[in-house]
């Protein structure tokens, strides 16, 4: 189990991680909209694209954490 968490803590952490994932998806969608608008207006979107890459990397980490929590809960449910 992750950090020796008990089942209730795992479930709470999973719930929080899923909330972060949902919020992250909204941020990513908004960032893509900003990029499209900037580029459509002929503006440089380099720094905004860099921020999008950070958002996407963070989202990847949250997905990995969610997957680890789900795996640990699956093991906990079998015991």
Image (tube, rainbow, N blue to C red):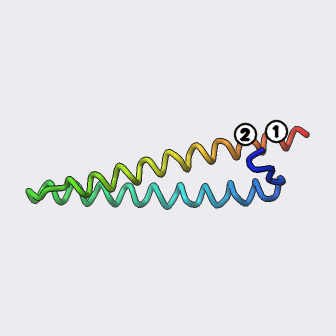
Distance from the alpha carbon under mark 2 to that under mark 1? 6 Å
Q: Residue at x 62, y 47 (%)?
A: 65
Q: Residue at x 76, y 42 (%)?
A: 72
Left or right relative to 38: residue 68: right
Disc on res. 36 = none
Left or right relative to 71: residue 32: left
- Residue 32 % position (x, y): 30, 54
Q: Farthest residue in the right direction?
A: 79
Left or right relative to 57: residue 15: right
- Quadrant assignment, res 79: top right
Q: Residue at x 75, y 50 (%)?
A: 3
Q: Are marks 2 and 1 in contact (CB under 8 Å)?
A: yes
Q: Which quadrant: the N terminus?
A: top right
Closer to the camera in the image, 15 or 46:
46
10 Å neighbourhood of mark 2: few (<14), some, or many (≥20)?
some
Q: Which residue is mark 1?
A: 75
Q: Residue at x 74, y 47 (%)?
A: 2
Label 2 residue SS: helix
- Residue 56 % position (x, y): 41, 49
Vertically, is 61 above or below 40?
A: above
10 Å neighbourhood of mark 1: few (<14), some, or many (≥20)?
few
Q: Which residue is mark 2?
A: 71
Label 1 residue SS: helix
- Residue 27 % position (x, y): 40, 60
Vertically, is 23 above or below 73?
A: below
């Amino acid at each position: 189990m992750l950090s020796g968490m008990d089942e209730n803590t795992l479930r709470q952490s999973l719930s929080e991680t899923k909330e972060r994932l949902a919020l992250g998806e909204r941020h990513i969608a908004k960032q893509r909209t900003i990029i499209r608008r900037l580029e459509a207006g002929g503006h440089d979107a380099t720094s905004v694209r860099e921020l999008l890459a950070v958002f996407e990397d963070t989202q990847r980490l949250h997905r990995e954490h969610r997957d680890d929590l789900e795996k640990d809960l699956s093991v906990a449910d079998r015991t």
